[in-house]
Amino acid sequence: MDKMVDARGLLCPEPVLLTKRAIEKLPGGTVRVIVDNNAAKENVTRLSETLGWTVSISPEGSDYVLALTK
């Protein structure tokens, strides 16, 4: 099961909180998180890796798409 979190335009800690809620509801699979700033990208990556998720990051224009998998 996949989940999408669009956190563009949000400042931390909101992208982290939205991501945390999404991955808590999903025991495994893929969560895609879209952010538009470096701080959110780094913080979401740190949270995800701490919780045991693998993160791959793809820049798309001025946004970043983080694919979290477990």
Image (cartoon, rainbow, N blue to C red):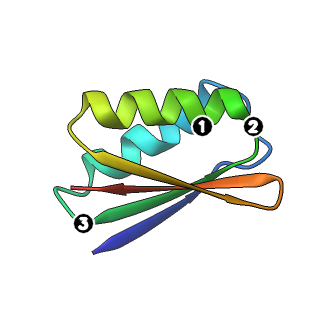
Label 1 or label 3, whichever lies nearer to me, is: 1
Residue that appears at 33% across and 65% down: 30
- Residue 4 appears left or right of 60: left
| Circle nearer the N terminus (1, 3) | 3
Instruction: Identify the residue position indicated by label 1 in the image.
Output: 41
Residue 34 location, x and y as percent? 63, 55
Q: Quadrant of the N terminus?
A: bottom left
Q: Amino acid at mark 1?
A: Lys
Q: Which residue is disc 2 drawn over?
A: 37
Amino acid tagged 3: Gly
Question: Label 2, label 3: how many angstroms apart (C-alpha)?
Answer: 25 Å
Say which element carries label 2: loop
Give the label on residue 23, or none: none
Where does residue 50 sit, x and y in percent of width and height? 27, 27
Please tell me in which quadrant of the rendered image residue 49 appears.
top left
Q: Position of residue 38 (x, y in %)?
A: 70, 32
